[in-house]
Image (cartoon, grey):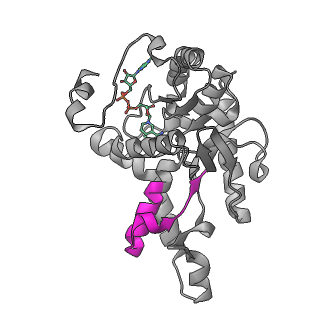
Amino acid sequence: MLDLQHAAAFLPRTKIIASVDYSVTVGSDLCIVTAGARQISGESRLNLLQRNVALFSSIIPSLAKYSPDSILMIVSNPVDVLTYVAWKLSGFPSNRVIGSGTNLDSSRFRFLIADHLDVNAQDVQAYIVGEHGDSSVALWSSISVGGVPVLSFLEKQQIAYEKQTLENIHKEVIGSAYEVISLKGYTSWAIGYSAANLARTIVRDQRRIHPISVLAKGFYGIDGGDVFLSLPAQLGRGGVLGVTNVHLTDEEAQRLRDSAKTILEVQSQLGI
Ligand SMILES: NC(=O)C1=CN([C@@H]2O[C@H](COP(=O)(O)OP(=O)(O)OC[C@H]3O[C@@H](n4cnc5c(N)ncnc54)[C@H](O)[C@@H]3O)[C@@H](O)[C@H]2O)C=CC1
Ligand SMILES: CC(=O)C(=O)O
């Protein structure tokens, strides 16, 4: 807290407080939960589940008690399952409980596509959906650059593109966190920007569309239980305002359902 307060002269006027007493959070508009165990090199996010569920049992009810009208944004891993846990423990409506989900994976994806095509990542529209983790799904069919749909453009021009190149880019996205963790022990900068990007949309009611972890049951044939995973959703002061109806190919929809199944299998061990 002190270390951040000492930056006061370089920041817009901001009140920075910290406490182990949850009453300091009273009346929050947005609660962002990043507490928890993190992966060691080579460990999967799903492996953190038991340790972080135990933490959530003390954190979430206290936040919900002091800020019953807030939006909860979960970042701790495994983010999709912990968003479900936070939803259950808070008793909040599902539109007010989100996970940072694949907002980060999609940025990694856009960065890699932009790098491959030598364009600006902000001009690349592309989504990773599903689990924030190993079963994530790349929506190749909806990639556009500067408004031009990339795959159909290439197909129309009969320009051969390497399916393997595309698969490799997705593999690189999945491997991104593992690579950074093996190099420096944890990831921090990109997730920080990703969470700040989501927070800005929410508190400023920007109504932008972000791929984030939402209650996904019923979308794209996802059934089998209440599951949170990432879909492109519109966000604002009310939380999740709607889920965008992005066109998925049959293969993409099947991969999304498989990703939901992976998360549900892990969730079934919880007994919540
Ligand atoms: N969703 C995403 O894309 C990402 C998620 N993460 C996840 O975020 C979590 C934290 O990672 P790091 O910040 O790297 O770990 P860290 O070890 O640097 O920080 C964890 C923090 O949690 C705090 N904490 C532990 N128990 C607590 C409790 N009961 N109440 C309040 N705070 C408590 C610790 O004091 C510590 O400051 C991990 O689960 C990690 O996997 C990290 C990066 C990206
Ligand atoms: C750690 C993590 O989930 C990430 O950087 O993607």
In the image, residue 210 above or below residue 225: below
Q: Quadrant of the C terminus?
A: top right
At x 64% / y 20%, what residue is drawn?
89
The answer to which of 212 and 78 lies nearer the viewer is 212
At x 43% / y 56%, what residue is drawn?
108
The percent position of residue 167, horizontal first and vertical second, equals 52, 65
Determine the residue located farthest toward the front in the rendered image.
13
The percent position of residue 153, horizontal first and vertical second, equals 58, 82
Please check the rendered image and state whether residue 51 is part of the magenta-colored stretch, yes or no. no
Please check the rendered image and state whether residue 111 is part of the magenta-colored stretch, yes or no. yes
In the image, residue 189 above or below residue 122: above
In the image, residue 54 above or below residue 78: above
Majority SS type along the magenta span: helix
- In the picture provided, is 95 more to the left or to the right than 135? right
Figure label count:
0
- In the picture provided, is 180 more to the left or to the right than 144? left
Q: Quadrant of residue 84?
A: top right
Magenta region, residue range: 107-129
- In the picture provided, is 239 more to the left or to the right than 45? right
At x 47% / y 18%, what residue is drawn?
25
In the image, residue 244 above or below residue 87: below
Determine the residue located farthest toward the bottom in the rendered image.
157
The percent position of residue 240, horizontal first and vertical second, equals 64, 42
- In the picture provided, is 208 more to the left or to the right than 114? right
The percent position of residue 110, horizontal first and vertical second, equals 46, 62
At x 51% / y 45%, what residue is drawn?
201
Answer whether residue 137 is visible to the viewer in this image: no
Q: Quadrant of the N terminus?
A: top left
Answer whether residue 215 is visible to the viewer in this image: yes
